[in-house]
Image: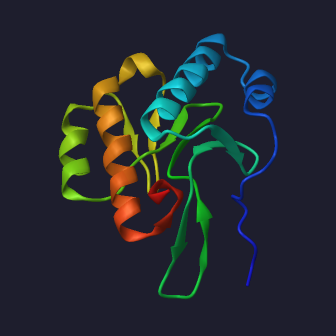
Amino acid sequence: MAKNKTAETTVSVVDFINSYVDNEQKKADSFQLIELMKEWSGFEPKMWGPTIIGFGSYHYKYESGHQGDAPLIGFSPRKAEFSLYVFSANEENRHLLNNFNKYKMGKACIYIKKLTDINIDVLEKLCKTTIAYLHEHNECACRE
């Protein structure tokens, strides 16, 4: 079975942001996201793969037999926009998106340009409902 590309690493989150993010606004937003997600999740930020900053972890297993670990919530400060890994497809989260403001929905993440484009209160609810959903449906560190 192939090894997951997105695994927790020992790379410093601060070093990653300072070396990878070349836009000062995106850098400031990254550090603000770290503080918010740390507070909402109760976990310290860790690098997952080369560009994802994740908080906590859970173990997933698909019917196909593929399994692995992933962060409960996280984000990546990509060049064009942020990728937010904060969404579990359930009715409450879909409803929350109505008041999220400027975003695009991807297959596994939400894309935003900057934090001022979104409703931070809605982001908090998305993060917390996602953690609760993952806690209920997977083996996760949030049970400790």
Is 59 rendered above or below residue 111? Answer: below
Tell me if 36 is positioned left or right of 78 in this view. Answer: left
Front residue of 40 and 48: 40
Front residue of 113 and 63: 63
**Which percent across, then down, holds residue 111?**
46, 38
**Rendering colour mode:** rainbow
**Which percent across, then down, holds residue 46?**
68, 42
Is 32 rendered above or below residue 59? Answer: above
Is 118 rendered above or below residue 49? Answer: above
Residue 38 seen anywhere in this rendered image of the structure: yes
Furthest-bottom residue in this view: 64
Tell me if 91 is positioned left or right of 76 in this view. Answer: left
Q: Give the quadrant of residue 43.
A: top right
Tell me if 7 is positioned left or right of 34 in this view. Answer: right
Q: In the image, what residue occupies the spot 25% across and 40% down?
A: 97
Q: How many numbered marks are there?
A: 0
Front residue of 47 and 139: 139
Q: In the image, what residue occupies the spot 40% across and 61% down?
A: 135
Front residue of 106 and 52: 52
Furthest-top residue in this view: 24
Q: In the image, what residue occupies the spot 67% across and 16% down?
A: 23
**Which percent across, then down, holds residue 101?**
28, 28
Q: Give the quadrant of residue 123.
A: top left
Residue 119 seen anywhere in this rendered image of the structure: no
**Which percent across, then down, holds residue 19?**
81, 25
Is 68 rendered above or below residue 38? Answer: below
Q: In the image, what residue occupies the spot 73% across and 85% down?
A: 1
